[in-house]
Image: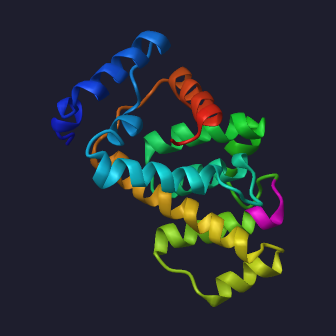
Amino acid sequence: MRPEILNNGYGFGAKALFAIVRIVSRRSLPDAAKLTFYRPDFYGSPAKEFTHQAMRGPSAWSVGERELMAAYVSKQNESPFCVGAHTSTAAQALGDEPMVAGVLSDLDTAPIAEPLRATLRMLGKLTREHTVDADDMRELRSQGVTRAQIEDALAVCFAFNVTNRLADAFDFSMLTPAGFDSGAAVLLKRGYH
């Protein structure tokens, strides 16, 4: 059940920004963006900064690979809004919609490099079982995944396990495919700030 305060609990500045976005883009601001304006000191600002660093900060993983991780974690959590948003963003970033769809439908047969497959497998396990162990890390390292890449992937996993739960708890409104594509273009241009 969507709390009414998320529809109306914003100050004048946020409401004005939402109206400007609606006029310029001809679309309402997605609920994921609106949530960061509700109690920005408690959740919004820290979450935006952490997510931006995880998704756009320096990393050996490309932006597209990190967006694919976000989509994969969201798929494991069965979070429809986040699956739609990050599937579209990953497909645009990687320029390969069939590959992204392949990863989300069958990771074992998807046409991706083994280090990325092993990393996604570990993120899936962590998301579903809430645990990983030394053997999981050894498997990643044997596939050529560096310690820094593991840390970066875990940051993406954390960000989207939190975001998925919020999206589902607050009943984020689903967008049309065109809405997800438009949002993806903005995410790729501006990041998560």
The answer to whether residue 115 is magenta is yes
Q: Residue at x 42, y 53 (%)?
A: 47
Can residue 74 be seen? no
Q: Which residue is drawn at 45% across and 42% down?
A: 80
**Figure quadrant of residue 31:** top left
Please tell me which residue lies in front, 4 or 55.
55
Q: How many numbered badges does the structure rendering display?
A: 0
**In this view, 143 is above or below 46:** below
Q: Position of residue 46 (x, y in %)?
A: 41, 55
**Figure quadrant of residue 57:** bottom right
Please tell me which residue lies in front, 94 or 124.
94
Magenta-tinted stretch: 112-116
Q: Where is residue 157 in the image (x, y as percent from the top left)?
A: 54, 62
**Figure quadrant of residue 30:** top left
Q: Residue furthest bottom?
A: 134
Along the horizontal axis of the image, is 34 left or right of 104? left
Along the horizontal axis of the image, is 7 left or right of 21? left
Along the horizontal axis of the image, is 166 left or right of 136? left
Q: Which residue is drawn at 82% across and 81% down?
A: 142
Along the horizontal axis of the image, is 183 left or right of 161? right
Q: Position of residue 38 (x, y in %)?
A: 27, 41
Can residue 99 be seen? yes
Q: Residue at x 23, y 37 (%)?
A: 6
Question: Is most of the magenta stretch helix, strand or loop?
Answer: helix
Please tell me which residue lies in front, 102 or 36.
36
